[in-house]
Amino acid sequence: MEDVAVVLDAAARFLETRPRSVAEVERKLGGMGYRSSLVAEVVERLVQLGYLDDEAFARSWVESRDRASPRGEHALRRELSQRGVDRTLVDEVLDARRDIPAGAEASRTPDEAAAERLLGKRLPAILREADPRRRRQKAYALLARSGFSPDVCGSVTRSVLAAADAGDGPDEDDEPGAEA
């Protein structure tokens, strides 16, 4: 296991499935038994070639989560940290996420928009609960487990369930308290 080409090939196979952070690649290659000097050399080469870029990885991770499996800022921060992304880089990416208007309603935060999307996906199951109090609890718990702040959990739960009770369903143009 002294050959750089062998380690580079192992890293390339690891990167085939999805983008990875530098720390993920280092952990994987180190766990496969390769010498740390070879791992460092391969990681440096992959960074130079543009195959490893923690900033691009973090941005891609957040965009993917926002699109496919919405998470709150707390969960995103934890997930990126677990993948070895530097805290200051995570802060920069999440700050940039906050600066982008969330959908049609610019007054909503990205977390509110993501929470609405998540709740909208699970709304049919939540609405099967007959008791309104239990329905609110289930919706709030779903959002809390997904890393949204208590403020976001409460406000989005109220607005989405109020819209559903009114027969509107979740609508991106609706704003709590807005006149129809």
Image (cartoon, rainbow, N blue to C red):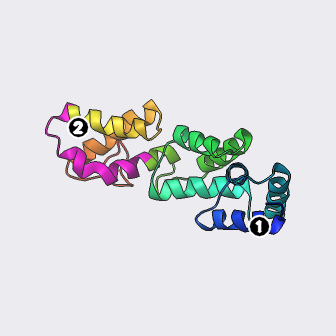
| In this picture, residue 157 sits left or right of residue 4 | left
125 drawn magenta: yes
The stretch in magenta equals 115-133
| In this picture, residue 133 sits left or right of residue 49 | left
77 drawn magenta: no
Which numbered circle lies on residue 135? 2
Residue farthest along the left direction in this orientation: 130
Q: Mark 1 points at which residue?
A: 6
Which numbered circle lies on residue 127? none
**x, y percent for residue 21:** 68, 53
Q: Foreground: 30 or 22? A: 30
What amino acid is labelled 1 in the image? Answer: Val
**x, y percent for residue 177:** 34, 40
| In this picture, residue 150 sits left or right of residue 48 | left
What amino acid is labelled 2 in the image? Answer: Arg
Report, in whole angstroms, how far the alpha carbon at label 1 lies from the one at label 2: 55 Å
